[in-house]
């Protein structure tokens, strides 16, 4: 074997070793998530809307390594986050681990539980898998738990009162019915929705 062949062989070995070393490790460039429909979800500690009801916001997550091969990740290591959303413990997680028979793939379809603390107009949901950000999806949220405390009580009622009948161009966290039309507003319809959850919603 001449030296050129040795070099080519060594280069091939290094390539093979590096791809082997990356097997099973998520590469964000080859991983992604999709959202069935953009929109806004009503989230509450006791559970309100799910990712697929009443509107279809199903999230599909595809995890691959640098060779575009599926990566197996346990469900509890796949979640969604946003600085304004405060999940209950275990408030959101993937439907399943990305194991066989559907390797590298999972969904979010269940009912997330939690509240909000901040400006709901800024919310977009970041999909995180084993510490890697996979996607930043155009899915917003509003919540009955207006201070992210994990329950719905008089504190939230006071916060609701502070924005009642106040019209704003941004999506108010207390606009529970997500009424749009150029101006988002918090009105009697939202008050009725709030009443339905008051003192009934607690994190598990
Ligand atoms: Ca609260
Ligand atoms: Ca409203």
Image (spheres, rainbow, N blue to C red):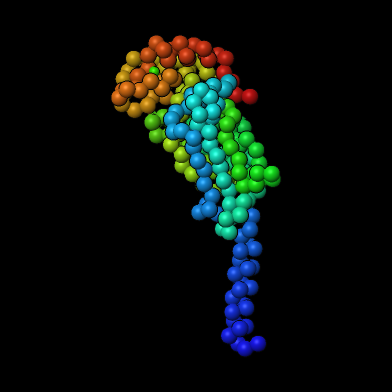
Location of residue 182 by image quarter: top left
Compared to residue 31, the image places residue 8 above or below, namely: below
Compared to residue 36, the image places residue 12 above or below, namely: below
**Is residue 74 among what the camera can see?**
no
Compared to residue 105, the image places residue 43 above or below, namely: above
> x%, y% of residue 201?
57, 18
Instruction: Tally the numbered discs.
Output: 0
Location of residue 102 by image quarter: top right
Location of residue 163 by image quarter: top left
Q: Identify the image quadrant of the N terminus.
A: bottom right
> x%, y% of residue 136?
46, 42
Residue at 54%, 28% (x, y): give it.
Answer: 52
> x%, y% of residue 171?
37, 26
Name the side, left or right, on which 104 lies relative to 140.
right
Residue at 59%, 69% (x, y): give it.
Answer: 15
Residue at far right of view: 100
Looking at this view, is 145 or 58 the one in front?
58
Looking at this view, is 47 or 202 the one in front?
47
Residue at 62%, 32% (x, y): give it.
Answer: 90
Residue at 44%, 28% (x, y): give it.
Answer: 40
> x%, y% of residue 167?
31, 20
Q: Identify the image quadrant of the C terminus.
A: top right
Compared to residue 183, the image places residue 124 above or below, namely: below
**Is residue 2 among what the camera can see?**
yes
């Amino acid at each position: 074997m001449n030296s050129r062949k040795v070099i080519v062989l060594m280069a091939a070995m290094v390539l093979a070793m590096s791809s082997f070393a990356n097997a099973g490790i998520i590469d964000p460039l080859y991983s992604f998530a999709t959202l069935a429909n953009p929109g806004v979800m009503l989230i509450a500690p006791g559970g309100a809307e799910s990712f697929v009801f009443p509107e279809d916001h199903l999230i599909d997550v595809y995890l691959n390594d640098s060779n575009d091969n599926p990566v197996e990740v346990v469900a509890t290591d796949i979640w969604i986050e946003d600085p304004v959303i405060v999940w209950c413990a275990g408030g959101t997680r993937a439907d399943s681990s990305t194991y066989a028979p559907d390797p590298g793939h999972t969904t979010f379809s269940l009912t997330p539980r939690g509240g909000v603390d901040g400006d709901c107009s800024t919310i977009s949901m970041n999909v995180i898998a084993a510490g890697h950000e996979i996607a930043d999806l155009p899915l917003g949220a509003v919540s009955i738990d207006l201070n992210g405390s994990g329950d719905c009580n008089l504190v939230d009622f006071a916060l609701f009162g502070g924005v009642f009948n106040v019209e704003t161009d941004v999506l108010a966290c207390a606009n529970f019915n997500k009424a749009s039309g150029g101006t988002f507003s918090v009105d009697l319809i939202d008050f009725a929705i709030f009443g339905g959850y008051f003192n009934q919603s607690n994190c598990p």
